Image: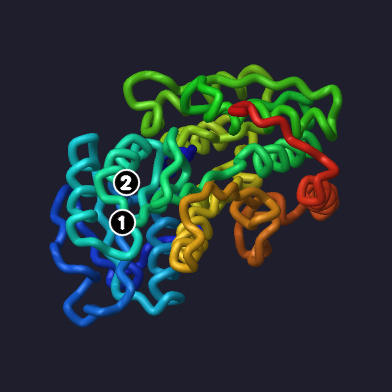
């Protein structure tokens, strides 16, 4: 499950020009994204929320664009939703246009995907970051092992903490979202046995977009002595970074390179590569291997850290100045990939 803001990757004018964006239920009825693409492979992406500054969804757009290029597809459509009603309408519009694959991103689409899969057995669906309760031959699920990369970020925190106190600001107190806090604490304790941890939750009516509440929670952690804080507050991460700057502690971002949004305050980022899941998922379906669930973690390249990706030197992430820490984290990463180290999954 994703964090809903959910930056090194940005949708530039060129990128936006390469997809057909729609908001609400403005779906076109033809198969393909534009008149010039008729006859080509057609892909449609439906998002649960507006893409805007949602890093997780930006990556999904990038993924469907890459899939279209790799598969010789036409211009992909992207339908942006804003609530339950528009999600249902957008999926129905996507089904009506009968593309080769409809990619749905987020747990919000699990029930809708099940309903549409039963009603339209010949339509192929890719459900990213969630899965239907029942298995369908025309629904392929792509899920993530977020806890593996969060564990590595926690190890960085454990190696860098001076107070031996780390913390996390999480959106909600649920098993799925605790994947962003419990493994962080476990990773810190792995390398610093004396490390203590504390998690505070945003909650409330807008847990994914409450920067003020996230800032307050982060400030509380900082005043309590935590000098390394996992920012798992989705759209509220900006508040965590503000608190880090004013409180003198360091933060860790999610989904994309958030070091760029708050230089000097962010150590590293847990990267959830929605683009990889979308592109590989579409390729899998077109090869006739759909109807399964694929889990993406460190081994599959679906989860990572900015520190473990190319371009670290230009990332503005503080971890770039700690080569010794990075070496230890790389070793832990290798152990996880090799199966020598298993990270507990709070959502299991």
The residue positioned 68% from the left and 51% from the top of the image is 298
Q: Secondary structure at mark 1?
A: loop
What residue occupies the far bottom of the structure in this picture? 36
Q: Badge 2, how many Cα within 10 Å: few under 14, some, many 20+?
A: many
**At 38% from the left edge and 29% from the top edge, which residue is drawn?**
210
Mark number for residue 257?
none
Between 232 and 285, the one nearer to me in the picture? 285
Task: Tell me the quadrant of the picture where the C terminus can be found.
Answer: top right
> Residue 325, how many percent across, how many down?
81, 48
Compared with residue 231, is residue 277 higher up or lower down, i.e. above or below?
Answer: below
Q: Is residue 205 left or right of residue 304?
A: left
| Residue 49, placed above or below residue 215 | below
Q: Residue at x 48, y 47 (%)?
A: 141
Residue 265: tell me if it is visible. Answer: no
Residue topped by disc 2: 117
Question: Of label 2 and label 1, which has the lower sequence position?
Answer: 2
55 vs 247: above or below: below
Report if the CB atoms under discs 2 and 1 are less than 8 Å apart. yes
Q: Is residue 58 left or right of residue 149?
A: left
Q: Quadrant of residue 168?
A: top right
Camera-nearest residue between 261 and 45: 45
Q: Residue 18's spot in the image, x, y percent?
A: 31, 72
Pick whichever, 76 or 113, lies toward us: 113
Q: Residue 158 at x, y = what percent?
A: 78, 34
The structure's colour scheme is rainbow
Say which residue appears at 72% left-offset and 56% top-offset.
Answer: 320
Q: Which residue is mark 1?
A: 123
Left or right of 92 in this view: 199? right
For the residue carrying disc 1, how many other residues have a C-alpha within 10 Å: few (<14), some (14-19), or many (20+)? some
Please tell me whether mark 2 sits on a helix, a strand or a loop.
helix
Q: Is residue 146 visible?
A: yes
């Amino acid at each position: 499950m994703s964090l809903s803001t959910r930056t090194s990757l940005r949708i530039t004018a060129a990128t936006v020009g390469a997809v057909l964006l729609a908001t609400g239920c403005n779906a076109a009825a033809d198969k393909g994204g534009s008149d010039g693409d008729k006859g080509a492979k057609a892909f449609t992406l439906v998002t649960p929320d507006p893409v805007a500054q949602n890093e997780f969804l930006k990556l999904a757009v990038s993924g469907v664009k890459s899939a279209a290029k790799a598969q010789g597809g036409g211009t992909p459509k992207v339908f942006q939703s804003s609530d339950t009603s528009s999600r249902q309408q957008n999926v129905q519009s996507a089904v009506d246009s009968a593309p080769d694959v409809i990619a749905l991103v987020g747990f919000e689409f699990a029930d809708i995907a099940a309903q549409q899969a039963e009603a339209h057995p010949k339509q192929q669906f890719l459900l990213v970051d969630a899965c239907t309760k029942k298995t369908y031959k025309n629904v392929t699920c792509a899920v993530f092992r977020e806890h593996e990369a969060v564990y590595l970020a926690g190890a960085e925190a454990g190696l860098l903490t001076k107070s031996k106190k780390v913390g996390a600001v999480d959106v909600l107190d649920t098993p799925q979202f605790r994947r962003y806090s419990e493994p962080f604490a476990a990773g810190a304790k792995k390398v610093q046995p004396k490390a203590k941890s504390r998690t505070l939750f945003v909650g409330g009516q807008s847990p994914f977009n409450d920067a003020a509440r996230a800032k307050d929670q982060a400030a509380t952690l900082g005043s309590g002595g935590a000098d390394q804080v996992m920012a798992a507050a989705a759209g509220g991460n900006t508040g965590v970074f503000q608190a880090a700057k004013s409180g003198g502690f360091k933060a860790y971002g999610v989904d994309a390179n958030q070091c760029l949004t708050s230089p000097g305050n962010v150590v590293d980022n847990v990267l959830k590569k929605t683009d990889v899941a979308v592109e590989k998922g579409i390729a899998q379906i077109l090869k006739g291997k759909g109807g399964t669930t694929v889990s993406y973690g460190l081994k599959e390249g679906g989860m990572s850290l900015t520190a473990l990706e190319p371009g670290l030197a230009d990332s503005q992430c503080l971890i770039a100045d700690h080569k010794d820490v990075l070496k230890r984290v790389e070793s832990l990463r290798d152990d996880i990939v090799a199966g020598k180290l298993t990270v507990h999954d709070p959502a299991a």
